[in-house]
Amino acid sequence: MTDSLNGLTIADAGKGLRRGEYSAVELASACIQEIEASPVLNAFCHVTGEIALDRAREADRRLRQGEAPPMCGIPIGIKDLFCTEQVLTQAASRILEGFEPPYESTVTARLRDAGAVMLGKLNMDEFAMGSSTEHSIYGPAVNPWRSHGSERHRTPGGSSGGSASAVAADLCLAALGTDTGGSIRQPAAFTGIVGLKPTYGRCSRWGIVAFASSLDQAGPMVKSVRDAAIMLQAMSGHDSRDSTSARRKVEDFEAAIDGDIRGRKIGIPREYRVEGMPEEVDQCWSRGAEMLRQAGAELVDISLPHTSYALPAYYVIAPAEASSNLARYDGVRFGYRANLEDGDGITEMYEKTRAEGFGPEVKRRVMIGAYVLSQGFYEAYYRRAQRVRTLIKEDFDRVFTSGIDAILTPTTPNSAFCIGEIADEDPIKMYLNDVFTVTVNLAGLPAVSLPVGLDSEGLPLGLQLIGKPWEEGDLLNCADVLEAGADFNKKPEKWW
Amino acid sequence: MAIDIEDARKAAHLARIRVREDELQAITRELSSILVFMEKLGEVDVAGVEAMTSVSPMQLERRDDQVKPGVGRDGILENAPQVRAGFFVVPKVVE
């Protein structure tokens, strides 16, 4: 049990609110106070204090009436990628400077309608492209975890790094992230929290600034597996405004958590034991597997033969889709427009606006995307990558058809690195952070990362459980058992 | 595949991103390293494999062709950098 309101889980806060131990206004105020006292983390980029207090008062009214849903009164942070009505939404980019959407994304609208209290917008890599939140117009977000005896700032990962840092530092009870290649799970692993990427199509993408439409999914970043179930419930469901959102009944995710995984088959993929992976990561993985075995699961050695092709396939497909999605940033309809000189025509307006409005990583990916889609390269790169994507998905299909219920892997090949450690000139090195997570997006599967231990430097290590499509309930049940076995329960020592 | 400065210039133009001459060398190098990384895909035998266009086996729904209320003109123009008389303003396009 934690002694501060902002340190609560969603589940515990829900109980306390219903027992009248504190109000939603008190919860929100505790978080806002903590946010204001933590500028060095650079997790929040816009704080919406007034909106938070208005919504908290409304939540208190609903709670008094006794018909409030589980997210009612819960203070959350929203990644800057979600459009929020009349609230600055910039995707951490200069090109969306001053953009206040006239509409609300479906996922944030659902959470708002469920009574969740928006505290503000969270820092991220520009357009969700990055693994360290260093590619942000707001400057890098900082991980509340540091290595033993060091004062060097570490990255909270990315792209949902502000979300991860805010949850880990108890600036909010939970946060929204998005995951295109690992952008929820890698930051969750780096900051010792739980992050879930749902099945593609589970949550509506409407109103989320698009990066790679065939891969993007929104998901919860939270302090426990149970909280992931509660928050996902409020986010899920069909939306006629997103043609890829699934028309499926949404099961009760929290009810699926019963702690019983006896007889479940957990696959351990041999291809994830990559060269150069630190011994500690490997040990953490074995420890996690052993916890599941002791809970009655059966461990099965499996093979996902196309794993090593996932990263190159991803870095063809995602930039190709991004180059198309980001074509809308042209300086005409919203956001930034470059100052033009006399005689500049429309092409100069586009080229100058995009040169000044996009950061270096976004420019790189948009150019790569345009290149792999161009005549003469489309077949060799893009078409081939799409075929390889089919093979990657078939690897998973085969394993699940053979009776495997979930797959256990490390979330990342390393713990959080220092800010500035990976040079901007070496994009591939940064991309390697996603080696265990991109496969899941390519195959459209649900996966959750949860903290399992600390490395010798005192930094969190996470494990990833990958589930069958549409079976988030079963996946979270396995994760809950692993969470209980790991008994992580650690918070960063407060220095900020 | 390593690319040369002309290829990088072409990619920048396709992407409608202005690149200064003194930046081209570095960009060529970065794009080359990414494209070389992608070459690994050439190892895979993809003969007869269908290209994935949708990750979940579902049909896109059709909706009724109905007029519905939207944000409206003023709402749409609200965020534009330059507006006049209910229109977006852009540099002269036609001579």
Image (tube, coloured by chain):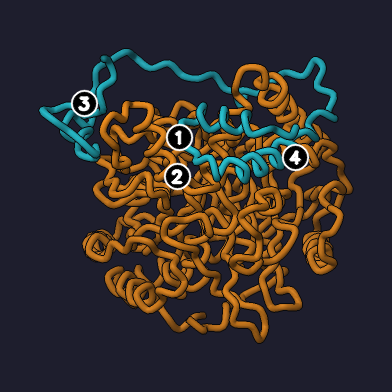
Chain colours: A orange, B cyan
Q: Chain under label 3? A: B
Q: Could you tell me which residue is drawn at 78 percent across and 49 percent down? A: A264
Q: Chain under label 4? A: B
Q: Residue furthest left?
A: B85
A95 lies left or right of A236: left
The image shows residue A124, relative to residue B34, as above or below, that is: below
Residue A51 image offset from top left, x and y in percent: 24, 60
Residue type at mark 4 is Phe
Residue A295 shows in the view: no
Residue type at mark 1 is Leu
Residue A127 or residue B60, whichever sits in front: A127
Q: Could you tell me which residue is drawn at 44 percent across and 75 percent down? A: A40
Marks 2 and 4, how far apart at CA: 24 Å
Kind of element beneath mark 3: loop
Q: Earlier in the sequence, mark 4 or mark 3?
A: 4
Kind of element beneath mark 4: helix
Residue at the disc numbered 4: B37
Location of residue A171 (image quadrant): bottom left
**Between marks 4 and 3 in the image, the one whose residue lies nearer the viewer:** 4
Residue at the disc numbered 3: B69
Q: Chain under label 1? A: A
Marks 4 and 1, how far apart at CA: 23 Å
Marks 4 and 3, how far apart at CA: 47 Å
Whether marks 2 and 3 lie on the same chain = no
Residue A328 shows in the view: yes
Could you tell me if the residues under marks 2 and 1 are in contact, i.e. CB atoms within 8 Å?
yes
